[in-house]
Image (tube, rainbow, N blue to C red):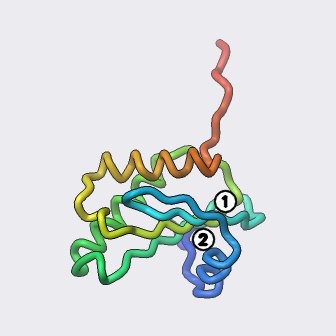
Amino acid sequence: MRKDRSLTNPRDFAALRNYGRSWSDRFIVMVVRPNFLDNNRIGLSVSKKIGKAVVRNRIRRRLREAMRQLNLRGGWDILLIARKESPKADFQTLKSSVSTLCGRARLVNISPPRIE
């Protein structure tokens, strides 16, 4: 993920947590807030309570890849917070979870079918 596409500033994380809207399921909490930019910025939060560094990094990689594969509308700050159940989930389950949450937040870009 490119540096300009990721949330790194602690103030951005705090603003997102305080003023963003959240959706959750068994594996992930997703917090969303408009950023008035052309692209989305994504932040990942995986607590030490989840597991050791290897487990936390695996979850981060899986969440990052799941977000990369989605076709999302631009202009949003998105924070994904892993829950305790996320280490037990495989990639397809996490991808499905992220996709469902993005759909509930109406972030998925639904383009009309091409007419040829």
Label of residue 4 in the image: 2
Residue 6 falls in image quadrant? bottom right
Residue 49 image point, x, y percent: 30, 81
Query: Residue extending furthest right?
Result: 36
Task: Answer few, some or many: residues within 10 Å of disc 2's Cα (few below 14, many 20 plus, some between 14 and 19).
Answer: few
Say which residue appears at 55% left-offset and 59% top-offset: 23
Residue 37 image point, x, y percent: 74, 64
Residue, disc 1: 39
Q: Secondary structure at mark 2?
A: helix
Viewer-side residue, 42 vs 99: 99
Say which residue appears at 40% left-offset and 45% top-offset: 96
Question: Number of labelled discs?
Answer: 2
Residue 24 image point, x, y percent: 49, 59
Q: Secondary structure at mark 1?
A: loop
Q: Is residue 29 left or right of residue 19?
A: left
Query: Residue extending furthest top?
Result: 116
Task: Answer few, some or many: residues within 10 Å of disc 1's Cα (few below 14, many 20 plus, some between 14 and 19).
Answer: some
Does the CB distance between marks 2 and 1 fall below 8 Å? yes
Amino acid on which disc 2 is placed: Asp
Residue 75 falls in image quadrant? bottom right
Query: In the rendered structure, which disc, 2 or 1, sits on the residue that comes first in sequence?
Result: 2
Residue 111 falls in image quadrant? top right
Label of residue 49 in the image: none
Q: CA distance from mark 2 to mark 1?
A: 9 Å
Residue 45 image point, x, y percent: 44, 75
Q: Is residue 36 left or right of residue 51?
A: right
Amino acid on which disc 1 is placed: Asn
Q: Is residue 1 above or below residue 96?
A: below
- Of the 4 image quadrants, the one containing the C terminus is top right
